[in-house]
């Protein structure tokens, strides 16, 4: 069985030195690997899809190699999501969800990370410098802006209660805010 791209990147992470990381990338040099690295770091390649993860069925129960397809076979279709074409937005997104559901969930996570340029969030040692060292002609001079790693924080928005029913009590927005800040109130 062929080593999947996420397995290659995991192996790169486990390598101790920069030279070992470079040789690991060169050892598994494939069109899909180079293409995904290029899509993550090249500002000229932008996915024509919304940010974030689409709703898809992630099958974590299937072992690697038993899914309908893999990234090596599906990589040739990536032009659909990269360039503007005649497909409608709905059709393009539907095809993307089909891709994610047809490949192994680790490969789907990789594709989603590349789409949002967050490959280095999951595999921190896979940097533009490492890619340039392994494949000198792959990346352009100017690199894409990689989003910083941030913790997702959700704001609590308090809605004042309506005074429409029996026993309902109205609180001002200030009182509700104070209650969220100080739970003892």
Image (tube, grey):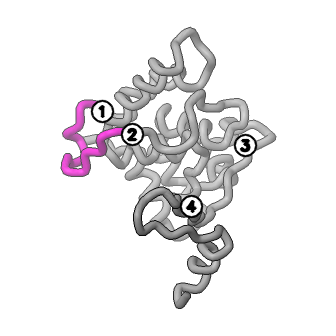
Q: Residue 44: x, y in percent? A: 71, 30
Q: Which mark is residue 159?
A: 4
Q: Would you name the residue on which mark 1 appears?
A: 102
In primary-sequence order, the first of circles 4 and 2 is: 2
**Residue in the foreground of this view, choosing between 161 and 29:** 161
Instruction: Check disc 2 and report the residue beneath it.
Output: 55
Q: Identify the image quadrant of residue 45.
A: top right
Question: With respect to residue 179, does 149 lie above or below?
Answer: above
Q: Is residue 163 above or below residue 78?
A: below
Nearer to us: label 3 or label 4: 4
| Residue 57 included in the magenta stretch of the image | yes
Q: CA distance from mark 2 to mark 1?
A: 14 Å
**Left or right: where 129 falls relative to 119:** right
In this orientation, which residue lies closer to the viewer: 182 or 176? 176
Residue 152 visible:
no
The residue that appears at 45% across and 22% down in the rendered structure is 76
Q: Nearer the viewer, residue 64 or 99?
A: 99
Q: Going from the N terminus, do you reach mark 3 or mark 2 first?
A: 2
- In the picture of the structure, the residue carrying the numbered disc 3 is 144
Residue under the image location 29 percent in, 31 percent down: 69
At which x and y percent is residue 81?
A: 54, 25
Q: Is residue 53 left or right of residue 42?
A: left
């Amino acid at each position: 069985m062929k080593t999947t791209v996420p397995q290659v990147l995991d192996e790169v992470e486990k390598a101790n030195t920069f030279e070992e990381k470079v040789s690991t990338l060169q050892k598994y040099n494939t069109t899909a690997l180079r293409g995904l690295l290029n899509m993550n770091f090249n500002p000229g390649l932008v996915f024509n899809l919304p940010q974030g993860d689409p709703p898809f069925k992630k099958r974590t129960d299937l072992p690697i190699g038993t899914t309908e397809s893999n990234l090596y076979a599906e990589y040739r279709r990536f032009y659909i999501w990269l360039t503007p074409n005649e497909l409608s937005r709905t059709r393009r997104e539907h095809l993307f969800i089909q891709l994610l559901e047809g490949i192994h969930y680790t490969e789907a996570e990789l594709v989603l990370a590349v789409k949002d340029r967050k490959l280095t969030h999951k595999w921190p040692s896979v940097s533009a410098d490492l890619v340039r060292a392994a494949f000198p002609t792959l990346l352009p001079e100017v690199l894409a802006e990689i989003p910083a790693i941030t913790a997702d924080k959700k704001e609590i928005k308090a809605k004042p209660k309506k005074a429409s029913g029996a026993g309902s009590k109205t609180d001002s927005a200030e009182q509700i805010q104070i209650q969220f800040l100080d739970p003892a109130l």
